[in-house]
Amino acid sequence: MYGMLNEGIRSFVTENHGPEAWQSICETAGLDQLEFERMSSYDDAITYKLIDAICGFTGLPLADVMAIFGRYWVDFAGASHFGNLMRLAGNSFIEQLKGLDDMHDRILLTMPHLKPPSFEVEQRDDGSCILHYYSEREGLAPMVIGLLHGLASETGEHIEVSQVAAKSEQCDHDIFEVRILDKAPQPSSTGA
Ligand code: HEM
């Protein structure tokens, strides 16, 4: 994974638990570094070890840590210079969801070793959607749940997500059902 993601994890831990916690998590993960180059690519094992070490530190289950981090990542990455790529896709959760592959493709232009996820959205008449998530990696589905909640909060929407199929020998990807519950009123452009 690109160092930017590991830096996101560092920021997540230091904001919530302080720099000593981060140092101890890196030690548990067996790392000899405390910081990462955002634009360099690192072994995925580092990211998985960091997440495991956070579970050990907080006592939270793996799925919870991944979901909480996923939600945090949208704020972290959204505040980076890539943030506009996400917002340019549209003003609603569904539009931004549909724009994720294009967004990651555009990031690929500056991060050539990126192994981006791919999403396919099937909209249903009742406003809900079925989301297909394809990845070369294993075990990231709980993070996707947090990412989706984070994405929805970008446009003031609230969603309910349930995983309806998991990547397995029978199915080559994870599948989620996403329901949009409500949309918070947007501030008017005149400020009135
Ligand atoms: C501005 C916002 C975002 C930026 C800059 C960004 C960038 C990145 C980067 C750099 C990676 C690491 C991939 C690698 O190193 O190979 C990544 C992974 C990933 N991103 Fe995004 N991302 C953003 C938003 C989102 C959102 C909103 C979602 C989903 C709702 C998402 C889904 C994922 C997933 C699932 C992965 C893990 C890779 C995998 O599945 O194999 N990202 N992203």
Image (cartoon, rainbow, N blue to C red):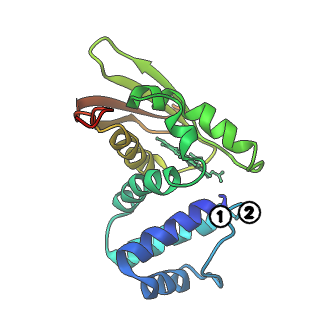
Q: Which residue is drawn at 31% across and 11% down?
A: 125
- SS class, disc 2: loop
Q: Label 2: how many residues lie within 10 Å, few (<14), some (14-19) or many (20+)?
A: some
Q: Is residue 78 above or below residue 170?
A: below
Q: Disc 2 marks which residue?
A: 40
Label at residue 21: none
Is residue 5 visible from the viewing direction of this image? Answer: yes
For the C terminus, the quadrant is top left
Q: Disc 1 marks which residue?
A: 3
Query: Looking at the picture, how far across and down is residue 20, in whole percent?
Result: 44, 88
For the N terminus, the quadrant is bottom right
Query: Looking at the picture, how far across and down is residue 154, in whole percent?
Result: 38, 42
Q: In this view, does 148 lie to the left or right of 135?
A: left
Marks 1 and 2, how far apart in space?
6 Å
Q: Which residue is drawn at 50% across and 50% down?
A: 78
In front of the other: 163 or 129: 129
Query: Looking at the picture, how far across and down is residue 89, in whole percent?
Result: 52, 30
Mark 2 residue's CB less than 8 Å from ligand 1: no
Query: Looking at the picture, how far across and down is residue 12, in whole percent?
Result: 44, 68
Quarter of the image where one finds residue 27: bottom right
Which residue is outermost to the top? 125
Point out the tag, 1 or 2, that comes first from the N-terminus.
1
Q: Is residue 43 above or below residue 139?
A: below
Q: Do the residues labelled 1 and 2 touch (CB within 8 Å)?
A: yes
